[in-house]
């Protein structure tokens, strides 16, 4: 196994050296490779825990890209640190709008690695969800131009076809359906991931980003090429929805419907202030909802009751009951520890004294986008992500090009799904989150 990994990394490194941009595009097709996990060891250093971090194939790919970019620009490194403070404040710095919020997020995430028994595991999460995702985000912004961003989306679209192929096999054969949760959920496809909802989480942003290529290819291409690309883009949308349906990812389906309605509304009412207010209202609802909704009087036994669509929408079905209970328990914990939260990997451990339903497991996160950030990164981490979100929404609405409107809808759809899900704390999802921000900066380039 190790020899295969080494051979793969050598080949990928050769590809990245020869064609760095193509290597960047290929990362999106390889997003599911985070599932190939292993540990690094380095002899004596392992004994002190320096190199015994959890690792995965996707992590190695990103670090190879970082290393090759560093080597290819080695002559520029000494100049990088000259007048670093002034460069950080320079208005021509492409990252100027997000620099302080990104710094706050990284610092908060690093501090959060110390608040749990498994510090090595927490450092592994910090490495994957923050360092690697943000390094890759920087590489995208520095190396890609407007015309390159659509190739990132093409790579994601090819991934959709691959996911659909696996989903179709699982649906027809009933084999190789891997579910890492404790509740038996028959008939839901998992495809390349460990649980059904992972499909909805990754396919939702791809669904909306595909509209960038759909509209661009429709106007910029001609003849037969335009026809085939249109079919490719439309099929991506259709297959995404089919897989989400087969996975029964209800939050993704609701977010797709909500995103399409917002897209139609913003196309009809083109007033920037109106779009900004509605967008910020989505963020506010996602933030406030867990604090105003009540916990269920009791949680139904799994598989005993068939719930109606109305009950599902108002979080009265089993899934909704569990989330409402988690939110109340998490808020009770945050009342006692509002500043530090539970740490990057400490939620399950810290929630034991607050958990009230024995036959329901304690999940890794409270399944509310802002509670996820707060309890994992502490109050300053929550502030960092809220600040980043508001900045991005404001910047996207200031210049409502067709691409920026789709990026805005993509981001809002992620937040809507995040009302009841965890749309960031996974290797592929963290990269997708920063891809939307990278898209804004890439289209902003002159």
Image: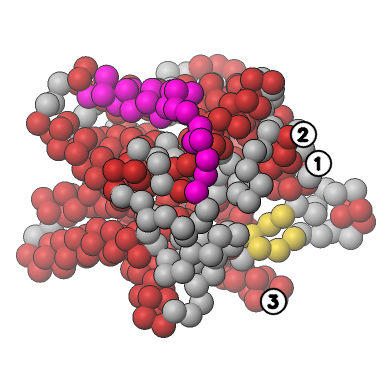
Instruction: Look at 62% across and 25% down and name the residue there.
Output: 332
- Residue 114, numbered circle: 2
Residue 367 location, x and y as percent?
Answer: 51, 40
Residue to which mark 3 is pinned = 1
Q: If you read the primary sequence from the N terminus, does the residue marked by circle 3 or circle 1 appear first?
A: 3
Quarter that holds the C terminus = top left
Instruction: Look at 68% across and 57% down and name the residue there.
Output: 55
- Residue at mark 2 to residue at mark 3: CA–CA distance: 32 Å
Instruction: Give the quadrant of residue 239.
Output: bottom left
Residue 265 location, x and y as percent?
Answer: 15, 32
Residue to which mark 1 is pinned = 117
Q: Residues within 10 Å of mark 1 (few under 14, many from 20)?
A: few
Q: Main secondary structure of the magenta part?
A: helix
Secondary element under disc 3, as helix, strand or loop, is loop
Instruction: Look at 69% across and 22% down and name the residue there.
Output: 337
Residue 323 location, x and y as percent?
Answer: 50, 40
Secondary element under disc 1, as helix, strand or loop, is loop
- Residue at mark 1 to residue at mark 2: CA–CA distance: 8 Å
Instruction: Give the quadrant of residue 157.
Output: bottom left
Q: Residues within 10 Å of mark 3 (few under 14, many from 20)?
A: few
Residue 61 on the magenta segment:
no
- Residue at mark 3 to residue at mark 1: CA–CA distance: 30 Å
Residue 290 on the magenta segment:
yes
Asked if residue 371 lies left or right of residue 342, the reply is left
Q: Which residues are magenta?
A: 275-300
Q: Is residue 172 in sight in this rendering?
A: yes
Q: Nearer the viewer, residue 152 or 413?
A: 413
Asked if residue 57 lies left or right of residue 407, the reply is right
Say which of marks 1 and 2 sits in front: 1
């Amino acid at each position: 196994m190790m020899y295969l990994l080494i051979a793969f990394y050598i080949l990928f490194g050769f590809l990245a050296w020869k064609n760095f941009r193509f290597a960047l595009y290929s990362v999106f097709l390889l997003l599911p490779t985070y599932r190939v996990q292993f540990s690094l060891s380095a002899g004596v250093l392992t004994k002190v825990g320096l190199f015994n971090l959890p690792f995965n194939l996707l992590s190695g790919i990103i670090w190879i890209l970082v290393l090759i970019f560093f080597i290819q620009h080695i002559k520029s490194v000494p100049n990088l640190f000259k007048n670093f403070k002034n460069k950080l404040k320079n208005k021509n710095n492409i990252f100027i709008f997000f620099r302080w919020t990104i710094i706050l997020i990284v610092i908060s995430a690093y501090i959060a690695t110390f608040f749990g028994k498994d510090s090595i595991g927490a450092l592994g999460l910090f490495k994957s969800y923050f360092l690697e995702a943000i390094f890759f985000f920087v590489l995208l912004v520095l190396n890609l131009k407007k015309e390159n961003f659509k190739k990132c989306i093409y790579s994601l679209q090819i991934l959709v076809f691959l996911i659909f192929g696996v989903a179709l096999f699982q649906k027809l054969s009933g084999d190789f359906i891997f579910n890492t949760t404790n509740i038996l959920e028959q008939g839901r496809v998992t495809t390349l991931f460990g649980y059904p909802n992972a499909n909805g989480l990754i396919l939702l942003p791809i669904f909306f980003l595909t509209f960038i290529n759909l509209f661009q290819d429709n106007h910029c291409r001609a003849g037969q090429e335009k026809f085939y690309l249109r079919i490719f883009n439309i099929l991506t949308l259709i297959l995404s929805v089919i897989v989400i349906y087969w996975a029964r990812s209800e939050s993704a389906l609701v977010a797709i419907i909500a995103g399409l309605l917002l897209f139609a509304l913003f196309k009809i009412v083109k007033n920037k202030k109106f779009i900004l207010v509605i967008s910020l209202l989505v963020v506010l609802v996602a933030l406030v909802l867990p604090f105003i909704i009540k916990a269920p009087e009791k949680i139904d036994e799994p598989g005993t009751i068939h719930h109606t669509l109305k009950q599902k929408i108002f979080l009265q079905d089993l899934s909704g009951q569990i989330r409402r209970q988690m939110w109340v328990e998490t808020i009770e914990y945050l009342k006692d520890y509002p500043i530090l939260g539970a740490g990057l990997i400490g939620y399950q451990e810290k929630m034991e004294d607050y958990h009230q339903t024995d036959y329901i497991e304690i999940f890794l996160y409270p399944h509310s986008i802002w509670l996820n950030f707060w309890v994992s990164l502490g109050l300053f981490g929550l502030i960092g992500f809220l600040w980043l979100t508001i900045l991005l929404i404001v910047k996207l609405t200031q210049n409502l090009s067709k691409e920026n409107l789709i990026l805005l809808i993509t981001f809002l759809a992620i937040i809507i799904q995040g009302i009841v899900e965890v749309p960031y704390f996974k290797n592929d999802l963290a990269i997708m989150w920063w891809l939307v921000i990278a898209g804004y900066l890439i289209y902003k380039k002159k």
